[in-house]
Image (cartoon, rainbow, N blue to C red):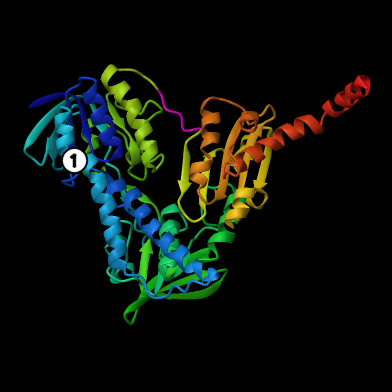
Amino acid sequence: MEKYDVIVIGGGSAGLTVASGAASLGARVALIEQSGRLGGDCLHFGCVPSKAFIQAAKEVSTARRAASFGLDVSGTVDLSAVKSRVEEAVGSIQQQDDPKRFTEMGVDIYFGRAEFVTPNALLIEGEDYVYGKSIVIATGSSPLIPEIPGLEDVTYHTNESVFDLEELPGKAIFIGGGPISLELAQAFSHLGSEVTVVEKASSILSKEDRSIQEAAVEVLGEDLRIVTDADIQKVTKDGDGLSLHCTVEGKDLHINGDMLFVGTGRKPNSEALNVDKAGVEIDQKGFIPAGDDLRTNVSHIFSIGDANGRYFFTHAAGMEGKQVVQNAVFGLKGKVSYDQLPWVTYTSPEIFHAGMTEEEAKESGINYKVYETTLDDVDRFVADHQTHGLVKILTDWKGKILGAHAVGEGAGDWMQPVLYAMAKNNGIGSLSNMTYPYPNHASAVQQTADLFWREKLFDGPVPVVTKKLIEYKR
């Protein structure tokens, strides 16, 4: 039986972070991956292919809008060319996850299914036994398929299959109003499909601030038909296509389409690990919960990335992986904090989220203030004719940033100064004190922060004092 300081189960973003980090510190590391290739969901089915697909669709949409300048762009999209763009992006980044790169670091790689036989021992493909002082579960997640009558009788797609489509659907139906579904739904719309998004909740993007939801619905509604409060009854075949049968506000609604996409959540991939043999607890959904030190209820076994069910983001997995390297290799008890964890929904315009929403601030009982700027007040966005959106920053009464949210083209990039301020515990005023090149998209951040100083300077006793001082100087 081979013995290791650290065994990592799962070769996705979280697992690769731990394997490379631990090996670089001199630990003996084993990496076990079931699928036969490294990179995980993000590289093969998620972040990378979706963003390449979205960018291609955005370029098509931009070209079509050129008609307003007298340039006639017509014709249908060659989906095979779009697929080639996606495959090229995946292939290029795949080189970074080449097994050879990790073996050269000193990582032993096993391809096959792993299962616990004791708290410290694993069996791989029924053949190889390995022993680990520390074991890291980073097995990721897969699309959760809801129980809808008739769904099994029609062809449907998830993020794992949608990029294999050979033809662009004339009409596409997307079940689910979360980020994955909305990003791809809008991309298909930009490519030329007629798209309907169906969501059972009262609004799409349920984790976002209410005002952000409203702004997103307004702008996304230009590309998509959005149906909320939908109770899906069944799916039926309809000739070469299908029909989704719903009840909305007590009325029957039938939506016809050529393609059905299901984006209704995620389920864990850890079922086959037999974690019960290690004494590891799972939650009701099958995820393996971990504390802020990323340890499970068994102290030498860690759960990170999608496997713990907290946040399904590659950057969250990377953050957790970095902390686990320290905790697993050196036996530390360092903790991660999710209070400022950002995320971006890569629609057009993008939707940025960091920290508390206003609804969460109200519920917590915190005394908070809101500073908000709409993009039609920001010169660069006016010049770009991209004025749909806003910036919203929540602070406590002293100016500490509690949350920051935005809707706007490129918001995931130009909102970064806010993240830096939050990380350094700098107040909102610091964002106003910076000098931004003019005209710049990030001026939206500065103008929002300016509101803090205007309030301080002009709404309190300061104007009275300064007026008297000026009169005295005369």
Count of marks placed on residues: 1
Residue 85 position in % (x across, y down): 30, 58
Which of the two residues, 68 or 80, is positioned nearer the viewer here?
68
Q: Is residue 330 left or right of residue 403?
A: left
Disc 1 crowd rating (10 Å Cα; few below 14, some 14-19, many 20+) is few
Kind of residue at badge 1: Asp
In the depicted structure, whether residue 209 falls above or below residue 240:
above
Q: Residue 367, located in which quarter of the rendered image?
A: top right
In the depicted structure, whether residue 213 falls above or below residue 231:
above
Question: In what element is the residue under mark 1?
Answer: loop
Residue 262 position in % (x across, y down): 37, 61
Residue 326 position in % (x across, y down): 32, 21
Magenta span: predominant SS is: loop
Which of the two residues, 471 or 164, is positioned nearer the viewer here?
471
Q: Quadrant of the N terminus?
A: top left
**Magenta region:** 335-339
In the depicted structure, whether residue 250 falls above or below residue 229:
below
> Which residue does the image show at 65% across and 53% down from the upper left?
376
Residue identifier under label 1:
98
